[in-house]
Image (spheres, helix red, strand yellow):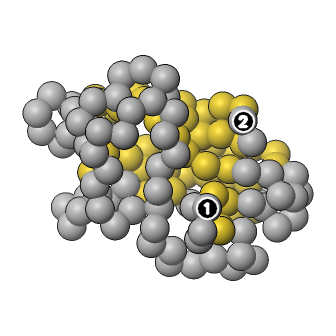
Amino acid sequence: MSADMNGIGSHHTLIFDVVKTNEGNGFHRNTRIFMPPESGFYVFPRTIRVMTYYSVELLVNRDVVGSTYHIENYSFDQGGATVVVFCNTGDDIYLRTGANYNVGPITSEERGRSSFAGWKI
């Protein structure tokens, strides 16, 4: 993520606009959604940096397969999680904010980046 996302509210897809590698072209730049090029087990690590607090969910299609809650009071916190899940070719995999507890920015700058990755095992 190249810049902060401010005041984004509930169930908002997080935008990861910097792509370092995209072997197999599973990450679609226009939708910012990962679609596995083939079925199998995938690893999805993420790091989220916040200034206040946010709930973040990993979805496969519309099913939540992982969630975290990041909190910091008037400073910065960076936390991560990793999910391993079976995906089918063409599933939609993405991060979004949860239904509740979303205040302040999700940050991404030179002192810490919010990031998302995925690969087949």
Q: Residue at x 20, y 40 (%)?
A: 51
Q: Is residue 79 above or below residue 4?
A: above
Tell me which amino acid carries mark 1.
Thr
Where does the image place residue 103, in percent across and percent down from the top left?
27, 30
Check disc 1: other Cα within 10 Å, few if <14, some if 14-19, many if 20+: few
- Rendered image quadrant of residue 118: bottom right
**Vertical relation: 29 (above or below) 34:** below
**Which of the two discs, 2 and 1, sits closer to the camera?**
1
Residue 14 in sight here: yes
Label 2, on which residue?
A: 62
The one nearer the camera, 2 or 118, is 2
Image quarter hosting the C terminus: bottom right
Q: Position of residue 92 (x, y in %)?
A: 73, 51
Q: Local crowd at mark 2 within 10 Å, few (<14), some, or many (≥20)?
A: few
The N terminus, quarter of image: bottom left
Q: Alpha-carbon distance for marks 2 and 1?
A: 15 Å
Left or right of 77 on screen, residue 83: right
Q: In the rendered view, would you say 36 is above or below 51?
A: below
Disc 2 residue type (three-letter)? Arg
For label 1, the residue is 31
Image point (39%, 33%), residue name: 9
Residue extending furthest toward the top: 100
- Residue 77 visible at all: no
Q: Which mark is residue 110?
A: none
Could you say whether the residue bearing mark 2 is in a helix, strand or loop? loop
Q: Earlier in the sequence, mark 2 or mark 1?
A: 1
Q: Is residue 91 left or right of residue 21?
A: right
Q: Would you say 104 lies left or right of 101 here?
A: left
Residue 31 position within the rendered picture, expressed as x and y whole percent measured from the top left: 61, 61
Report the residue at 72% width, 32% height from top: 63
Q: Quadrant of residue 73?
A: top left
| Number of numbered tags placed on the structure image | 2
